[in-house]
Amino acid sequence: MRTKPSLYQTQAFRIVLVYVLLFAFSVTALLFFTYWNTRRTLDAQTDQIIEAEITGLDEEYRHFALPGLVEAVRSRSLHQGQSLYILVDGQHHYVAGNLDPWPQVSGAPGDMLEFDFERPVNGKLETRRARGRLLSISGDFELLVAQDVHDRDLTERMFTTTLPWTVVLILILGTVGGALLGRNMLNRLDAINRTSGEIIAGDLSRRVPLKGSGDEFDVLSENLNRMLDRIERLMKGLREVTDSVAHDLRTPLNRLRNRLEESAARLSAQGALKDGTGASEIERAIAETDQLIGTFNALLLIAETDAGTTRAAMAALDLREVAADVVELYEPLAEEKRIGLTLMPSLPAVVEGNRSLIAQAVANLVDNAIKYTPSTGKVRIRAAITPDGVDLSVADSGPGIPEADRSRVTERFVRLEASRSSPGTGLGLSLVAAVAHFHNAELVLEDNMPTGLKAVLRFPKTAVRALPGAPLKSAAE
C-alpha cells in the first residue's frame, strides 16, 4: 500500500504552482510591455518638444545669424522649466544657455542622446537625467538642446524596483494559496484513502465520510459508498454460497471417503478379491477423494483469507519457530527423497500474523521445493531481519521457474507444463500469495544461484515486532 503523499506531491498544489508560474510570467510580461510602451511614448513626446525647440532656434539663426541665436538661447534659458540649452565655441567655452559646464555627452551631431547633468534643487545640487540633440553651428560652435527627463527616469526606476517585488509576492502568495488548497484536497483524499485501506484490510462495513458541502468530493464519496454497498452485498452472497457449498459438498465427500475406507476394509477381511484389484481401485478412489477435499479446503482457505475473516487470530509470532515446525513435519518426506532440508540459524524474527496461515504458506513452499527438487538436492529455509522488514525464504536446487512465468504461477489452478505430470491442483502458490496479501506482505520469486528457485515472504517493517527487552537487528549484524 502506498504511503500518504506529501503536500508538495498533491495534484492540487502542482496545478496551483503551474498557474502561479504562468500568472507571474504573464504579469512580468505585461509590466515589461507597459514599461517599454510608456518609455517609448515619453521619449516620443520629449523628442517632439526638442524638435520644436530646434525648429524655433533654427529660424532665429537663419534670420539673425549667430547673434540672434545667442540672444534666443539666452532668452529661453531665463524661463525655468524642463528645457535645457547650452551654446559653446570650438574650445567648449560657454557662450549662452542654462547648462554650465558642458555635460559629458557622446554622439555625432544630429543624434538623439542622453546624459546626466547637475541642477540646483531646493538649494542643493541634484544629479538628473536629460535627453537632447547635439547640433553643429558654422564657426565651430555647438548647440545642445535637451529636455529634463528626470520624471521619466523616476518612472523607470519605479518599474524596475516594483517588478521583482511584484513577481516575488505573486510567487509567495500563490505558493501559500496552493499549499492551503493542496492541504484541503489532501485531507479530503486522505479520508477516502484511509477508508479504502480499512476496506482492503477486510472491513467491508467502512464507508467514506461526507462533508455535506455537495461538492465534487461529496459526489465522489456518495458514488464510492454506493459501489461499496453493492460490493458488500455481493461478498455477503458469496460467503453464503461458500457456506452452502461447504455444507452441501464437503460433508458428502467426507462420508464418501469413509464408506470407501469401510468397503476396502471389508474386502480385505473377506478376501473377496484375492488379486487385490478391488482394493487397489478403492484406494485410488480414496486418493482422488482426498485430493478433492484438499482442493476444496484450499479454496475455502483462500476465500477466507481474501475476505479477512481470519484476522481475529493475529498475534506476535517468531517466524523461526513456525519454520522449525514445518521442517520437523517435512523431514521424513525429505529423507525419503534424499533431499537435505535445513533451517538456517538466524536472529529472532517476530511479526504480527496468523500462525496457522503463515505455517500453511511455509508448508506449501516447502512441499513445492521438495516436490520439484531432485534427489541429493538441497532445500534451505531462512528467517532474516532486513532494513525493510523481515524475509522468510525457502530456497531449493530444483529446476526453478522461468522469469516470464513467475507472475502467472500465483494465479489459481495455473500449472506450468513441466509440472503437469506431478500431483497437485495449482493452488499452492495461490494460497501463499493470499496469505502474503492478508499480512500486507509480498511473495517474491527469485533465482537461487546457481540453480533453483528462491521463494521469499517479505513482511513490511510495520509488521515487525520486537521480543521483550531485545532491540531489532539486521541480518548483517
Image (cartoon, helix red, strand yellow):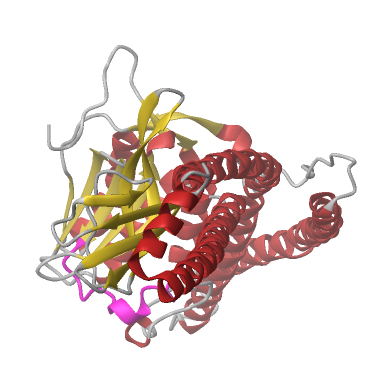
- The structure residue drawn at horizontal position 58% and vertical position 45%, both measured from the top left corner, is 174
> Which quadrant: the C terminus?
top left
Residue 381 drawn above or below residue 449:
above
In the image, what residue occupies the spot 49% across and 48% down? 163
Seen in the picture, residue 426 relative to 421 is either above or below; the reply is above
Instruction: Answer with left or right where residue 443 lies relative to residue 270.
Output: left
Q: Residue furthest bottom?
A: 417
Regarding residue 223, the answer to whether it shows in the image is: yes
Check if residue 6 falls in the magenta segment. no
On screen, residue 81 versus residue 312, left or right, reads left
Chain part drawn in magenta: 396-409
Residue 349 place in picture, x, y as percent: 30, 33
* Nearer to us in this view, 371 or 169: 169
Q: Which quadrant of the structure image shows residue 276? A: bottom left
Magenta segment main secondary structure: loop
Side (left or right) of 65 relative to 220: left
Q: Vertically, is 124 above or below 272?
A: above
Q: Is residue 398 magenta?
A: yes
- Return the residue nearer the eye: 179 or 385: 179
